[in-house]
Amino acid sequence: MTLLLQFIFSGLTTGSVYALVGIGFNIVYNSTSIINLAQGEFVVIGGLMMWFFFVGLKLPFLVSFTLTLAVAGLVGFLMERLTIRPLIKKGDLLLMIMVTIAVSILIRGLLMFKFGKDPYTYPPFTVGEPIVFLGAVISQQTLWVIGITCICIAILYLFFNKTMTGRAMKACSLDIKAARLMGINVSQIVMLSFIISAVIGAVGGIAITPISLMEYDKGAMLSVKGFCAAIMGGLGRGRGAVVGGFTLGILESLTAGYIHSGLKDAVALFIMLFILFLRPAGIFGRSEIMRLRKF
Amino acid sequence: MLVIRNLDVYYDKLYTLKKVSLHVKQGEIVTLIGSNGAGKTTLLNAISGLIRPAGGSILFNDEEILGKTPESIVKMGISQVPEGRLIFKTLTVEENLLLGAYSYYSIKRKREVKEEMEKIYKLLPVLKHRKKQLAGTLSGGEQQMLAIGRALMAKPKLLLLDEPSMGLAPTVIHEIFKYIVELKNLFRLTVLLVEQNARSALKISNRGYVIETGRIINEGSAEDLLLNRDIQRAYLGRDLDSEVKI
């Protein structure tokens, strides 16, 4: 029982990052129908830039945090302006998805150039005794990761349901023609979706690095896992990515704990396939929507 | 108010509109009738700035709007109710209306938006009853009213209506046209209406144009068009020559 609880908590921790990456996928997908495969790189940017500002330049925590998010947002902005905007008029989705792969390789290269191949870490946000809950030992950073993820989800919920810009983003995802007739500038919304997805990816990276370390090439695997989280929950559905991410994280940690850590990716992905066999549109996805979309 | 001169629209090398000229005066309801594929929707989309015409000019209150973005055209006071309504089905009725006010919305003008919404609720009480409901769950007629209400939220001077009767039952169509006249008088609108349901549309209009394969082939007052034999045969489903006199 104690062990199970322990595994579940460690699953929730990694699952948080998958959920954040998955949400990032959904936000970009909803406004453009593109799968942004550079999504995982934003997590790496978050972790490494945080190290750079916090440990490298010895700036105060909150300043480093803000600067890191600004850098990630800037990367998202540049990515959209330089690679997606020139192509989006042509409407070739496959081409744009390939371009996102190119961007991810470019980002990885630049990060390796700057940071080398070593893993980086910095001290947890708060120092103190781990909390013992029903026998399971939970480090404070774990609570930070889960808490920050919950805060991100809450902020995004408020943004999409209570602000005009958020509603406009939803409108673009539902019907571009109608959105333009409302006077919504679709190009700006696309740009904003890239910035937001970059920033929440970076938040995940900042929070997880003290636990699981960060190196330049972690992004690709995170992209895959985050994408799994998104399609498992139903691509384009906000809460889908959250549920999908946590499920994937817990499955992984249970496999690693009870079976073998070498099998954790395989078993988790196998169960994901199984879920998709039963519900091809994902847990929250609707099959009617599935049939209508391009990807 | 709206003056279109020699408008040309091409899709690649195929023209959909050729030298189209028409005008709409302040306070008028003008109907554009024509069959499928004649270029009616293309014309409205060109006015809204969704497509780029190859040549010609569109003047709105003596200002050239050709080449302007859809955003600035909405801001100038031209709203379109698109074909097939295109309401945001998974958003609530209220959110749909709010998005209609996107072009001028700001925290300072929140009250203005609220007042506008109350005005529309008063006129279309169905929407008020269902404001928390998802728009996709409304009936066809209610969805059409929502689409019109959403367009009115932008405080337009000129309202473009693209086939408001599409897919609706005859009694509902009657009601929608009644509402269009009411709304027009209440909001002091000018209306450009595109319809296949020519008779109902012409009945509430001042003037009409007939469009065929991208050209305007006839124009005149609504009464004249309703009585014109060719138009009766082609669009009103009535052939006087073959009718037997009793």
Image (cartoon, rainbow, N blue to C red):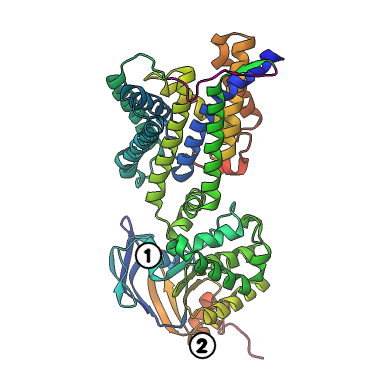
Q: Secondary structure at mark 2?
A: helix
How packed mark 1 is, by other alpha carbons closer than 10 Å (few <14, some 14-19, many 20 or more), is: many
Q: Residue furthest right?
A: A1
Of marks 1 and 2, the one in the foreground: 1
Q: Is residue A277 magenta?
A: no
Q: Chain of mark 1?
A: B
- Residue A233 against residue B115 in the figure, above or below: above
Left or right: B12 with respect to B98?
Answer: left
Numbered badge on residue B223: 2
Q: Give, as a three-letter code, the residue at label 1.
A: Ala
x then y, percent, for residue B72: 36, 64
Numbered badge on residue B46: 1
User: Magenta part mainly helix, strand or loop?
Assistant: loop
Left or right: A287 with respect to B41?
Answer: right
**Residue sitting at x 34%, y 40%:** A77
- Whether residue A235 is visible, yes or no, is no
Q: Which residues are magenta?
A: A123-134
Q: Secondary structure at mark 1?
A: helix
Query: In which quarter of the view is residue B23 placed?
Result: bottom left
- Residue A154 against residue B77 in the figure, above or below: above
